[in-house]
Amino acid sequence: MLTQPGRVEVSFYPDDLFPRLRRALATLADIEIRYEIERDHLKSWSGPKEEKERLLAELERRYRASREPLVSCLEGWRLKGRGLEPAAPRRTDH
């Protein structure tokens, strides 16, 4: 990026943030896509209703458990970028 003579360009984020951000977002996208595919497959499954509901609930639990650390990490980076400290993690057991 070009800067005017006499101006110093200061990086807003650490140099290693963008690769970590890119990896985190790619992993989050993989989790979302896998969840949608598995959920659609289960919803169209013609097995017993009780088993279907149990499998859907287990899928939802695994989805939330795999997604939460990434979302918390991304939120932490966002807050650090704004000069704020992330709040203490909340546990959400459903």
Image: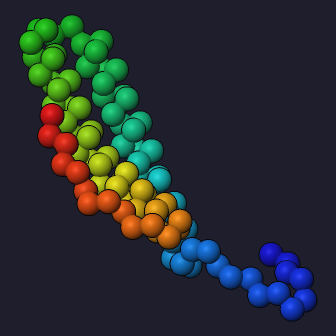
Q: Is residue 79 left or right of residue 53?
A: right
Is residue 6 depicted above or below 74 in this figure? below
Quarter of the image with the N terminus in it = bottom right
Q: Residue at x 43, y 57 (%)?
A: 74
Residue occupying the far right of the picture? 5
Judge whether 87 appears above or below 44 on screen. Answer: below
Measuring 54% from the left and 78% from the top, which residue is drawn there? Answer: 14
Residue at (23% x, 32% y) in the render: 60
Corner quadrant of residue 4? bottom right
Q: Is residue 1 visible?
A: yes
Left or right of 51? Residue 56 is: right
Instruction: Indicate the position of residue 81 as horizontal and vertical percent values.
Output: 52, 67
- In the rendering, at what x and y percent does residue 76 appear? 40, 62
- Give the answer, above or below, for where 85 lies relative to 58: below
Expressed as whole percent of the image width and height from the top left, the position of residue 34 reads: 36, 36
**Colouring chosen for the image of the structure:** rainbow
Q: Is residue 75 above or below residue 12?
A: above
Residue at position x 15%, y 34% in the image: 94
Measured from the top left, where is residue 15 in percent x and y? 56, 79
Q: How many marks?
A: 0
The image quarter containing residue 11 is bottom right
| Front position in the image: 15 or 23 | 15
